[in-house]
Image (cartoon, helix red, strand yellow):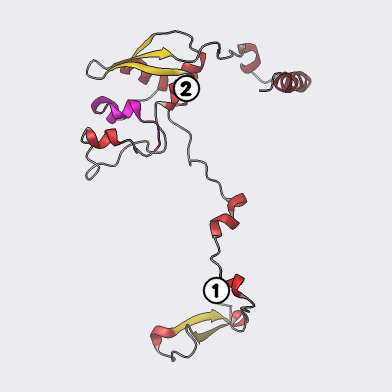
Amino acid sequence: MLADQEVEVIEKVIGKGRRVQNLIYIHRQCAYDMFSDLDDAIREHIDLFDLLEDFLDNSPSRESPYLELLEFFRLSDKSPLTLTFRQIETILGDNLPAEAYFFDAFWYENMPGMSSPMWREEGYPFHALIPDETDYYISDAWTSQGYEIKALHRLDQRVVFRRVVMGVSGMRIPKALTARKLPDAIVYKLEKLLKQFVKDNGL
């Protein structure tokens, strides 16, 4: 409460007495606000999150740390495809979490939050360690692009992938379109062309 606001002391529960435990401060202008209980419908549970659904942002607070790997698989057409852990770290531009080197479940998890029973089967010490990157799972980088793990050689620090979705390819955008800003007229024309292409092909 601000210093210049008039306040009043009232009972939290009317009729329970003016004991310290039953007294609260309230803005004087709110002291006589009334709540009218008109019918039983008013007593129904109100789901605040449901009411605020359009105003809440449920997206993760930061981007996936595996975006570069997803882009690698989007543009890849090789099968089988072998990558060492070091090559994956080079693609990511960062080290893999420690779990990658000690738990097969890291590579096979398909739900955020380490929900697969495989983690417990492998003896992950949940009681002692907080896992890294629990909002994301690395396997989405290849499964979303039509790949799966053919063989994991964790002790040798390499993974073999294979394509399971055929007849699709990742589109490569010419560098001339992304290397620098383009004149507004060209951007307008290109965006119009792409929108029509997307519409014509039901994308």
- The 10 Å Cα crowd at callout 1, few under 14, some 14 to 19, many 20 or more, is few
Would you name the residue on which mark 2 appears?
Answer: 70
What amino acid is found at the position of numbered circle 2 in the picture? Answer: Leu
Report which quarter residue 3 is drawn in. bottom right
Please, which residue is most extreme toward the front here? 40
**Residue 135 seen in this snapshot:** yes
For the residue pair 85 and 183, the one nearer the viewer reads as: 85
Q: At 55% from the left edge and 73% from the top edge, which residue is drawn?
A: 2
Q: Is residue 37 left or right of residue 116?
A: right
Q: Where does the magenta region start and end?
A: 98-112
- Assess whether residue 183 is covered by the magenta stretch: no
- Tell me the mark number nearer the camera, choosing from 2 and 1: 2
Q: Earlier in the sequence, mark 2 or mark 1?
A: 1
Q: Which residue is mark 1?
A: 2
Give how far across and how far down residue 188 sits, in percent: 77, 23
Q: Secondary structure at mark 2?
A: helix
Q: In this view of the protein, which residue sits in the foreground, 82 or 202?
A: 202
